[in-house]
Image (cartoon, rainbow, N blue to C red):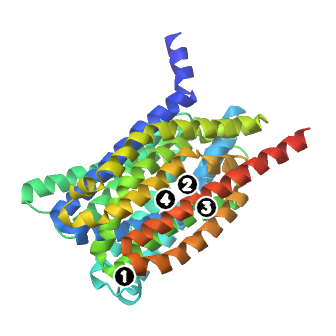
Amino acid sequence: MFERLKARFTRGIGMDLLIGLALKGGGAGASFALNLLISRAMGAEGVGAYQIALATTTLLAVAANIGLDTVVLRSVAVALRRGDEGAAHAAIRRALRVVTLLGLAIGGAMLLLAWPMTHLLMERPELFWPVAIMAAAVPVIALVRTISASIRATGSVLLSQSLDGVSYTGMTVLVLGGLWLGLGSVPALAPEVVYAAACLIVMLFGLTRIRKLTRHWPIGAQTLSLKSGLRIMVIYLAAFFCDWIAVVTLGTWHGPAEAGIYRVAMQFGLLFTLVRNSFDQMVGSHIAARFADGNYRGMLAIARKTGMIGGALCLPLLGLILLVPEWLLGLFGPGFVRGSSALLILAIGQFIAVTVGPIGTVLDMAHREHIAMRIEIGVTIVTIGLFLVLIPLYDLTGAAMAITLAIIGRAVALLIANKAFIRTMERRSA
C-alpha cells in the first residue's frame, strides 16, 4: 500500500516540480561555483574564453538534438499512457540514433570552423583551443538531452534531472577545485578539457540506464516526428542563438573579459531561468496528457499555476538583486562590479519570463510548435538588430537591454497565441 501511494504521489505535478527544481538548483549552484572558481583562478578573460566556447557548444548541441528531446518526451509519455511500450521504445531508439549521427557531424564541423571563427571572424586567436576542445562535447550534450527526456517520459524524474546539467557541471567543479587546491592554479584549457570529459561520462552512464529501463520492451511501430523536432529545434535554437551572438559580439568588440563579466551577470539571471526551465520540463508530460484528453483549458491552467509558483519562488531573488547588485558581482572579483546595471536589467526580464509560465510548452505539447517557431524567429531577428545597435553603444548593458526587450516581446506574443489556440480548439469541439 505504501509503495502504491508513494508512486502515485511521485507522479503528481507538485512532486515533479519539486524534484526538478531541486536538481536544477543544484545545477545552477554548480555552475555558479564553476564560474566563481574560474574567475578567481583565471580572471574575467578566463571566464570569457570558457563561456564563449561553452555558448558555441551549447548552441550546436541544440542544433544536433533537432528538438527530439521534446518530441521523444511527448511521444513516449503519450505512448506509455496508452500502454504501448513498443511505440515508446521505437521512438527512443530512433531519437538516439538520429541525434548521434547529427551530433558527430555538427561537432566535426565546429572543430573545422574553430580556426576561421576565432582568427578571421573574431580576430581573437587565443580562443581557438577552447573552442576546438569543446567541439568534442557537441554530440555528447545533444545525446544527454535526449537521454534525459527519454528517461523523464518513463516517469523517472529524479534520474532524468540528475543527468542534465548538475552531474557534469558538478564533476567539473570538483576536478578543477582539486587542481586549484593541489597546484595553486588552474592550468590553461583545463576547464574545457574537464567539462568535455565529464559530459562524456554522464552520457555513457545515461545510455546504460535507458537500455536497462527499456530492455524488456518490444519494438513497435515508429511514431517519432522529425518534422515536429525540426520546428521545435528552431524555437530552441533561436533562444540559444541570441545568447551566443551576445557573448561572441561582446568578445569580438570589447574582448573576452567583457564577455566574461556579461556571462557572470547572466548567471544570476539564469537562476530565474532554472526555475522556468525545470518547471517547463516537469509539466511537459502533464500538459501533453491534458491535450490527449481534450482538456485544453486544463493545459493553460497548468501553465498559469506553474508561473504563479515560479514567480513566488523567484521574488526574494529579484529583491536581493535589486538591493545589492554590486556586492553580488563583487564576489567574483572587483572587475566584475561594472556589470551591475546589466544584472539589474536581466533580473527584471527573467522574472517576467518566469511569471508568465510555460506557455511555449503548451503550444509544443499541443503539436502547435510551428506557431511558437514563428514567434521565436521574429523575436530573434529583432533581438539581433537590437544587439547590433545597443552593444556598440552600451557594451554589456546594451546586451542586457536587448535580451530583456526580447523576453517581453516573446511573452506577449505567446500569450496571444495561447488564447487563440484555446478558442480554436473549443470551437472545433463544440
Marks 4 and 2: which is nearer the front? 4
Dot label at residue 339: none
Residue at the image point whose x is 24% and y is 52% from the top: 173
User: Could you tell me which secondary element the residue under label 4 belongs to?
Assistant: helix
How much space separates mark 2 and mark 3, taking CA atoms? Answer: 34 Å
Measured in 3D between alpha carbons, the distance from the residue under mark 1 to the one under mark 2, in whole angstroms, is 36 Å
Q: Are marks 4 and 1 in contact (CB under 8 Å)?
A: no
Say which label, 4 or 3, has the lower sequence index: 4
Name the mark on residue 142. 4
SS for callout 3: helix
Q: Percent from the top left, x then y, of residue 142?
A: 49, 59
* Distance from the alpha carbon under mark 4 to that under mark 1: 27 Å
Residue matched to label 3: 409
Q: List the residue tagged with mark 1.
A: 252
The residue at 25%/63% (across/down) is 337
First along the sequence among labels 1 and 3: 1
Q: Residue at x 57, y 52 (%)?
A: 69
